[in-house]
């Protein structure tokens, strides 16, 4: 069965429970004690057999973290996080001895991924997607490695890249998101456990979608993903990440840093389908998703495009951004953020125009149901040297019911009179006559909401890779289940 | 097929339908005519199950089921279809996708397997040709930027795709030019059979030149005041609502 087919089937068969990925897998784990201190950081570094420069980098980040306050700008109600009451590293014991092929991986882990619809076995990889799967703190397997390496493409876990491609890591890690950016960025830099590393050499167009699947399995474990993607001159890559976690009563922390670098004429397309456990209807449990994603269009004519479908997490705090340094470079941000029940999301983007003739486009669709709050927060900043810069922003909010909230906070700063900035925003309620019309044609109320909301999100969903657009559409419908009476 | 007895309906405490009786058998076409505010559209919404309408008294039996106990989508999937006076626009949802979703909702309800893409394409092609609908239109978002005539043709296309047992046409003729009126009527006439029934709600006798009803009812102030055959429509055209209602 093709991966896509299997994924779709998986989504279909996941039945009627509210959160479809809420199982956990029983595995022996290696974990240092709870708490955040230099010893833990050293433990992580040792476990990963890192070179000394990497450990020094981490320890420095930890010093910075201790000095920085928690970011306060978002319209979120974030409970005080006790960083000492959390595990920072967890790996299933069977992965300790580094499986050399998929056959050596604990069948329980393979089963977990099969339940999620992520086929790891190469013989099943018929749909042209290379997958790197991250289970708690370690990368489980990277499929398609051989085929990619023939083209000179490096697609591996970041831990591996630290050892095999130290020059690239040293050069680019932290170059887009400085350690001192804000406290979550610093925390991630100190304790990051795993994530993907991609390097596309000059002139290479990556022939398959590269994909990572993140899963938090162990209890009380934070996941600190670190991803670094470098597209060298004239190259192209499309990358997709998906995320799930089991249902648990306590909150779990996911603080990721993702850095993208596009050199001359390079293009990076980065898509996210985020479906972390959102907590129950009363707001108990769920993932805190504090993510820093930033791309630098360093080269001329380079392009970075973010597409995100955010349906999960108790709290989402995320602003995938583009720094448009190269002349004629382009940044795009397409976002669907859905909040239901007690979920909170504060998400948006920053487009920083530095080079000449740079352009950016922002399409944001926020959907709020239940008692949820959904905020779009964006910054379009046009610096004085950015001649002829252009931006178009469109923010649409859709409300379902009368206890939820939608907020739009767009900042525009322009220091160049040649620039052209457009902003459009709408807020609407789901129309009962539309619902009635659909139901009169035989759709039940949930299917009707799913259909209308998918129509509302179409401009964004069509930017997802084909295989995932279908899954995302189902996810949109699933996450709004129970939102209409 | 449909048996309405002593129906009383109000909305926000205002009585709209006041003791309406109507019986429609399999294979029959009934026309319901009446002035503005007489309760015509309210009846179509009550039959299809729109909320906000309070049923104060009476019963509605549909195919040996208590219609009032069924949800909107259950009624639809049991073969009750309402062609809307004002079809809704649904941005971002392609018309053909909507049609496919509707057909498969019904099939799922009936325990049948989904219609495959090829079968669907064939069906939609032949039905569109019958109604003189350009299939390019089906690629556009449902009813978005459709002209008044296109919207009504679209309703009739949906009707013929879903082949309902009981179809209610709520002032489908309003805003139609003579060509569109003819096409829409032909669509209805093609669907007419011994197995299904129609309730055609209209202001004007004009539509009934094309869709010949078996029975004509005149509604005024929430009740049917006079029933007859097609000749009643002609009489109405001549005398007007007031005279007929008063003489009843």
Image (cartoon, coloured by chain):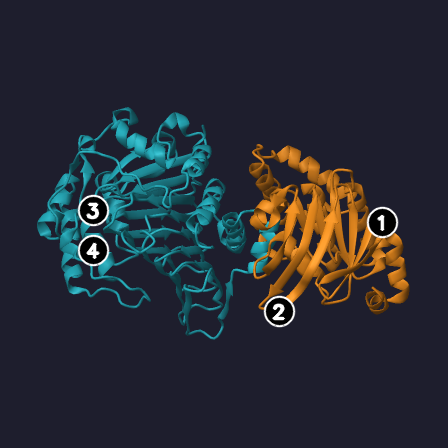
Q: Chain letter for mark 4, please.
A: A
Residue B191, percent across and down? 77, 42
The crowd level at tag 2 (other Cα within 10 Å; few <14, some 14-19, many 20+) is few
Residue A274, percent across and down? 37, 48
- Mark 3–mark 1 CB contact (< 8 Å): no
Residue A389 in the image: above or below residue A232: below
Mark 1 lies on residue: B212
Mark 2 lies on residue: B14
In this view of the protein, can residue A437 be seen by the observer?
A: yes
Quadrant holding the N terminus of chain A: top left
- Between tags 4 and 3, which lies in front? 3
Q: Nearer the viewer, residue A141 or B233?
A: B233
Q: In the rendered image, which quarter is residue A14 located in?
A: top left
- Chain letter tied to orange: B
Mark 3 lies on residue: A221
Residue B145 in the image: above or below residue A384: above
User: Element under label 4?
Assistant: helix
């Amino acid at each position: 069965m093709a991966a896509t087919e299997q994924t779709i089937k998986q989504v279909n068969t996941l039945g009627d429970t509210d959160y479809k990925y809420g199982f956990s897998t029983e595995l022996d784990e290696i974990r240092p004690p709870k708490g955040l201190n230099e010893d833990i950081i050293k433990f992580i570094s040792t476990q990963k057999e890192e070179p000394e420069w990497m450990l020094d980098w981490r320890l420095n980040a930890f010093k910075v973290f201790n000095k920085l306050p928690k970011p306060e700008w978002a319209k979120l109600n974030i409970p005080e996080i006790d960083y000492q009451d959390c595990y920072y590293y967890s790996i299933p014991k069977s992965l300790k001895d580094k499986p050399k092929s998929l056959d050596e991986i604990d069948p329980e882990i393979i089963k977990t991924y099969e339940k999620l619809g992520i086929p790891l076995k190469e013989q099943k990889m018929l749909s042209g997607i290379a997958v790197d799967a991250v289970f708690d703190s370690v990368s489980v397997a990277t499929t398609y490695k051989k085929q990619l390496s023939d083209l000179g493409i490096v697609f591996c876990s970041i831990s591996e890249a630290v050892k095999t491609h130290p020059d690239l890591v040293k050069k680019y890690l932290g170059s887009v998101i400085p350690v001192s950016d804000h406290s979550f960025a610093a925390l991630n830099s100190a304790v990051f456990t795993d994530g993907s590393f991609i390097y596309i050499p000059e002139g290479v167009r990556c022939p398959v979608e590269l994909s990572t699947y993140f899963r938090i399995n162990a209890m009380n474990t934070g996941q600190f993903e670190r991803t670094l993607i470098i597209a060298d001159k004239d190259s192209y890559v499309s990358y997709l990440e998906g995320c799930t976690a089991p249902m648990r009563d306590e909150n779990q922390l996911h603080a990721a840093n993702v850095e993208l670098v596009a050199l001359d004429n390079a293009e990076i397309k980065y898509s996210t389908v985020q479906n972390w456990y959102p907590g129950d209807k009363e707001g108990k449990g769920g993932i805190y998703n504090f993510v820093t994603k930033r791309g630098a269009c360093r080269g001329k004519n380079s392009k970075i495009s973010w597409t995100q479908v955010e349906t999960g997490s108790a709290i989402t705090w995320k602003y995938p951004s583009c720094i448009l340094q190269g002349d004629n470079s382009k940044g795009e941000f397409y976002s669907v953020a859905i909040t239901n029940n007690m979920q909170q999301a504060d998400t948006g983007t920053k487009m920083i125009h530095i080079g000449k003739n740079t352009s950016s486009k922002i399409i944001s669709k926020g959907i709020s149901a239940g008692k949820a709050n959904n905020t779009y927060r964006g910054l379009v900043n046009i610096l004085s040297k950015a001649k002829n810069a252009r931006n178009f922003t469109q923010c649409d909010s859709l409300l379902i019911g009368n206890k939820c909230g939608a907020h739009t906070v767009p900042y525009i700063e322009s220091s160049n009179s040649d620039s052209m900035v457009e902003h459009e925003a709408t807020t609407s309620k789901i129309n009962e006559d539309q619902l009635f019309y659909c139901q009169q044609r035989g759709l039940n109320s949930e299917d009707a909401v799913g259909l209308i909301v998918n129509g509302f999100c179409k401009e964004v969903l069509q930017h997802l890779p084909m295989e995932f657009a279908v899954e995302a559409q189902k996810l949109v419908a699933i996450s709004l289940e129970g939102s209409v009476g | 097929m449909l048996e309405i007895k002593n129906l009383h309906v109000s909305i926000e405490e205002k009585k709209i339908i006041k003791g309406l009786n109507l019986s429609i058998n399999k294979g029959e076409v009934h026309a319901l005519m009446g002035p503005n505010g007489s309760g015509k559209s309210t009846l179509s919404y009550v039959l299809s199950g729109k909320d906000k309408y309070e049923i104060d008294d009476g019963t509605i039996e549909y195919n040996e089921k208590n219609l009032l106990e069924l949800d909107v989508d259950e009624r639809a999937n049991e073969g009750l279809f309402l062609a809307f006076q004002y079809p809704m626009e649904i941005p971002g949802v392609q018309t053909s996708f909507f049609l496919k979703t509707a057909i498969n909702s019904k099939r799922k309800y009936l325990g049948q397997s989904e219609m495959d893409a090829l079968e669907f394409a064939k069906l939609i092609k032949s039905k569109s040709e019958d109604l003189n609908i350009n299939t390019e239109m089906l690629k556009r978002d449902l009813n978005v930027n459709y002209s008044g005539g296109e919207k009504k043709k679209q309703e009739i296309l949906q009707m013929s795709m879903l082949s309902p047992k009981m179809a209610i046409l709520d002032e489908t003729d309003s805003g139609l030019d003579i060509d569109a009126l003819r096409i829409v009527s032909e669509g209805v006439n093609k669907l007419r059979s011994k197995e299904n029934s129609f309730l055609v709600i209209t202001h004007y006798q004009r539509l009934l030149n094309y869709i010949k009803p078996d029975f004509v009812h005149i509604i005024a102030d929430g009740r049917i005041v006079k029933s007859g055959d097609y000749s009643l429509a002609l009489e109405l055209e001549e005398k007007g609502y007031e005279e007929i209602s008063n003489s009843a």
